[in-house]
Image (tube, rainbow, N blue to C red):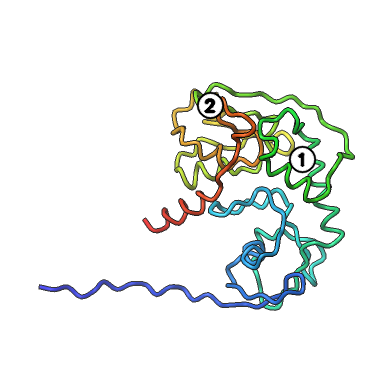
Amino acid sequence: MTHPPAATNPAPKVRVVTLKIDDHDVGARETDSILEIAQANGIRIPSLCYLDGLSTWGACRLCMVEIEGFSKPVSACSTTATEGMKITTNSARLKRYRRMILELLFAERNHVCSVCVSNGHCELQDLAAECGMDHVRVPYRNATYTIDSSHDLFRVDHNRCVVCTRCVRVCDEIEGAHTWDVMGRGVNCQVITDLNQPWGDSQSCTSCGKCVQVCPTGALVKKGTAAGEMEKHDDFVPYLAQMRKRQ
């Protein structure tokens, strides 16, 4: 006896919208973010907390853009496209804001590149060079944070952390372990493992190393790694995210 094919739900309809980014006419799905549309069309918008394959956090604000009719800049990663938008990605005001954000990040913790194992392979360092940030105009906090070397394979240096939460999201959304989380508020925010236990004592950590691979700075590193070996491979996250959706 043959059975009729199971009924499948039709894919939801997504409307296509047209808009302008830096005077370039582009088309996109109405569910796409401005950052996704810009990347798909080869338009560079600086970002730090955003990573393809992970949920949108929208915390670093480096991807700010101006939209005609909007009184304030908005984050490109968390703003979806609408019909007729006119977007500017690199005005003098945006350049000034991005530089100030980077200066605040550098002043908040210790980001002395010359003594960092990620020197030359650091997204924060690259963004500073891209945005013309060659010095910091605000006082350094000079706050001292801990270094946790209790894990057999990895080390976390909170002095280098920018709290982008990539490690938190990849651990939860891709690995499914949710070892990492965030504690505190404002400048006192800090990523933690298992309710602020030493990383080496974590019962949930699978030692997969995904958090180390997505860290944009030298905050999370593999022990015994030299500066020349700190290349990251972020492209595996979108691949893993697609494989999980197909399951």
Residue that label 2 marks? 199
Q: What residue is rendered at 83% in x and 62% in y?
A: 91
Identify the residue at the far right of this view.
137
Q: In this view, does 238 lie to the left or right of 110?
A: left
Q: Which of marks 2 and 1 is nearer the N terminus?
A: 1
> Is residue 156 depicted above or below 36 in this figure?
above
Give the structural element (helix, strand or loop) at label 2.
helix
Q: Position of residue 57 (x, y in %)?
A: 63, 51
**Residue located at (69% from left, 38% from top):** 120
Residue indicated by mark 1: 105
Q: Residue 156 appears at what percent x and percent y?
A: 60, 29
Give the structural element (helix, strand or loop) at label 1: helix
The amino acid type, in three-letter code, at marker 1 is Leu
Residue 82 lies in what quarter of the image? bottom right
Pinpoint residue 99: horizontal percent, then vertical percent.
Answer: 82, 48
Q: Which amino acid does label 2 sit on?
A: Trp
| Residue situated furthest left in the rendering | 1
Q: Which residue is drawn at 66% across and 23% down?
A: 146
